[in-house]
Image: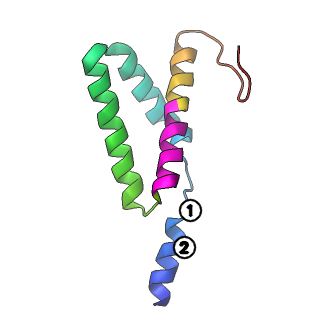
């Protein structure tokens, strides 16, 4: 019983959020920029499905997974803006 409890406690902690994994964020942004239409949708869906599986395998709850996926989406969008040379708005600010 104690071993299971320790496993459950570790599963609640995400030590390195997806949105902070700069290399993966940059790669996804680059590939999305190079892909268009249905191919871009298919690629994005495959990325999300893979990330979802990875987070589920770590034991995260659905709510946590959804937050991580949305944060990753935001990070990819900000990276795409940066790659275009635009200034990304600061968190909490809009243009």
- Residue 30, quarter of picture: top left
Task: Provide the residue span drawn in magenta.
Answer: 62-73
x and y percentages locating residue 16 in the rendered image: 55, 50
The overriding secondary structure of the stretch rendered in magenta is helix
Q: Are marks 1 and 2 in contact (CB under 8 Å)?
A: yes
Provide the residue designation for mark 1: 13
Say which mark, if any, is on residue 50.
Answer: none
* Rendered position, 6 above or below 54: below
x and y percentages locating residue 39 in the rendered image: 25, 20
Out of 65 and 88, give the one closest to the viewer: 65
Out of 61 and 80, give the one closest to the viewer: 61
Extreme-bottom residue of the structure: 1
Rendered-image quadrant of the C terminus? top right
| Residue at (37% x, 20% y) in the render | 32
| Residue at (47% x, 27% y) in the render | 26
- Residue 38, quarter of picture: top left
Provide the residue designation for mark 2: 9
| Residue at (46% x, 60% y) in the render | 60
Out of 37 and 20, give the one closest to the viewer: 37
**Does the segment drawn in magenta span residue 31?**
no
In the picture, measured across the screen, residue 32 lies left or right of residue 95, that is left
Q: Is mark 1 on a helix, strand or loop?
A: loop
Rendered-image quadrant of the N terminus? bottom left
* Rendered position, 68 above or below 5: above
In the picture, measured across the screen, residue 85 lies left or right of residue 51, that is right
Report the Cα–Cα distance between label 1 and label 2: 7 Å
């Amino acid at each position: 019983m104690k071993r299971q409890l320790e496993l459950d406690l570790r599963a609640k902690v995400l030590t390195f959020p997806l949105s902070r994994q700069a290399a993966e964020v940059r790669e996804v942004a680059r590939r999305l920029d190079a892909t268009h239409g249905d191919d871009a949708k298919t690629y994005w869906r495959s990325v999300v499905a893979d990330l979802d599986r990875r987070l589920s395998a770590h034991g995260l709850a659905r709510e946590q997974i959804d937050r991580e996926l949305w944060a990753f989406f935001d990070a990819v969008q900000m990276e795409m803006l940066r790659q275009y040379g635009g200034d990304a708005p600061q968190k909490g600010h809009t243009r």
